[in-house]
Image: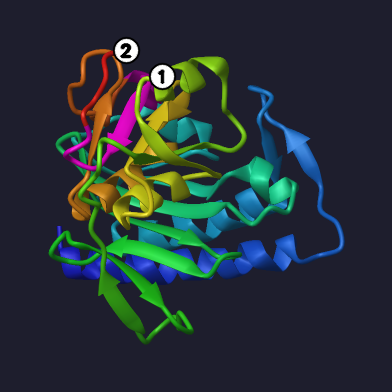
Amino acid sequence: MDHQELARVFRRTALEAGAKIMEIYEADDFEVRSKSDESPVTAADEAADALISAALREAFPDILLVTEEQAASHAESAENFLIVDPLDGTKEFVKRRGEFTVNIAYVENGVPVRGVVYAPAKNRLFYTQADGKAVEESGALDLDTVGEVRPIHVSAPDNGGLVVVASKSHRDQATDDYIAKYNTKDMTSAGSSLKFCLVATGEADLYPRLGPTMEWDTAAGHAVLLGAGGRVIRFDDHSELTYGKPDYRNPFFIAYAPGVDLKEA
């Protein structure tokens, strides 16, 4: 895989998809439907998926593409594959909270080694460069010209007072009970894969997820966090969270900055 080209295509495609999503987000109204699993889907999910899928298939025709919005792609498997959630945080999108993201990742031998997370309503763009290091780009976010980028890195956590981030739409008692095992100085909530990015930038130390997710929900954020020196492990046995699992379904997990004194389930 040409990681230089991968980084270029990921960045440009995420920005294009984000622009398409914002066209719909800023409209007076948009239709919201329910999928078979009762999760919401909008025209923005579908438009972004079509754009991203076309761009990735043109650029990388020989690599398996798995995307949330194309159920047929979920039946295939490969050691190396592209995985996409064109609009993560549809509930946040529908409620016009702004905390939704475009997510594109490349998985190699079970590890999400490259990824991009773009939050168009917040003008925040996180991605791994060709060398795998994670950065956040600021400024105009032009399609063809890379703006100012700054390397991002996880915090050096203080176990006497951690910053914990949790889901805005999927918070439950089990999550609160687990978080209560830690000494926290601040709690924050965020939608979509932004939670991984807050750990990656050092804005949070710990993100536990005790709820169902799919690999396309997590792969891009996971890649960014890995590129910033962080880790994502299974909640049950603290082994590494891997990709290419049956049905692309994740177990509960913990994303964190190394140095956090992890508690048992």
Q: Is residue 259 found inside the magenta-colored segment of the image?
A: yes
Residue 246 falls left or right of residue 16: left
**Residue 46 percent coordinates (x, y):** 63, 50
Nearest the eye: 113 or 95: 95
Q: Is residue 215 visible?
A: no
Q: Which residue type carries mark 2?
A: Ala
Residues under numbered marks 2 and 1 in contact, where contact means CB atoms less than 8 Å apart: yes
Residue 263 falls left or right of residue 139: left
Tag 1 residue: 178
Tag 2 residue: 265
At x 55%, y 16%, the residue is 173
Residue 23 falls left or right of residue 203: right
Does dot 2 land on a helix, a strand or a loop?
Answer: loop
Q: Quadrant of the C terminus?
A: top left
At x 62%, y 66%, the residue is 20
Magenta range:
246-260
Mark 1 nearby-residue class (10 Å; few <14, some 14–19, many ≥20) = some
Q: Is residue 199 visible?
A: yes
**Residue 238 percent coordinates (x, y):** 21, 20
Residue 106 falls left or right of residue 140: left
